[in-house]
Image (cartoon, rainbow, N blue to C red):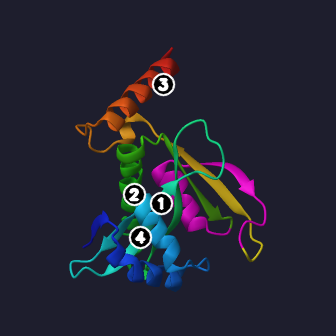
Amino acid sequence: MFTIRKATPADLPAIQNVNLTNLPENYNLQLYYYHLILYPTSFVAVTPDNKVVGYCLTKIEDDDPHPVVTGQVTSISVLRTYRRLGIATKLIRAAENSMIEVFGARAMMLQVRVSNQPALHLYEKTIGFTVTKVSKHYYLDGEDALILTHNFTLDTLINKDCSSVVVDEWKRVMQEQENKQKE
């Protein structure tokens, strides 16, 4: 049993612990804090006793010019004993919806190691990401990264009744886009 909720600064040591336990790419607490303050779209998975067992750290892509607002998964990880329970999928879905509600994002991107076939399967087959390019020698150890993108549709938004200036404009633009594709 687990719950998905927005990450808070109090979660940072536990997020860092999950990162250090699972991933070769390690970040300092300042990076996590930066993400939480500037981009309130990161989530954690917690057990009933509030133990953080996974996280999805996100931001708005600002490194490259994109024609539409694009979210980015900076880092995602779930403790091994909690994998294959749908936690990563739920974390990404929560982040996608938050990106839509807060920033009006129309897509999300992420990088994954070429060798990480389980994650690649999850991103492509379960969530709907597609590989858009390869970034050679992306990781410090020289391994290539696959760049994946998930373009949102109206079905991406879980809470269809959600309404705000940002969400209403997002719905309008997405509806126009879907209508053009039908023509």
Q: Amino acid at mark 1?
A: Thr
User: From the viewer's perspective, is residue 76 above or below residue 162?
Assistant: below
SS for callout 2: loop
Residue matched to label 4: 55
Secondary structure category for the residue under label 1: strand
As helix, strand or loop, the secondary structure at mark 3 comes to helix
Left or right of residue 110, residue 126 in this image: left
- Using a 10 Å C-alpha cutoff, classify the residue at mark 1 as few (fewer than 14 neighbours), some (14 to 19) or many (20 or more): many
171 lies left or right of 178: left
Taking depth in this image into account, of 37 and 73 the one nearest to the observer is 37
Q: Quadrant of the N terminus?
A: bottom left
Q: Amino acid at mark 3?
A: Gln
Q: For residue 177, which numbered disc appears in the image?
A: 3
Circles 1, 3 touching at the beta carbon (< 8 Å): no
Q: Residue at x 61, y 66 (%)?
A: 117
Q: Earlier in the sequence, mark 1 or mark 3?
A: 1
Residue wearing tag 2: 41
Amino acid type, mark 2: Thr
User: Pointers 2 and 1 in contact (CB under 8 A)?
Assistant: yes
Magenta stretch, residue numbers: 115-139
Which residue matches tag 1?
58
Q: Is residue 16 left or right of residue 43?
A: right
Q: Secondary structure at mark 4?
A: strand
- Mark nearest the camera among 1 and 3 is 1
Q: Which mark is residue 32?
A: none
- Lower position in the chain sequence, tag 3 or tag 4: 4
Which residue is painted at 41% across and 50% down in the image?
A: 96
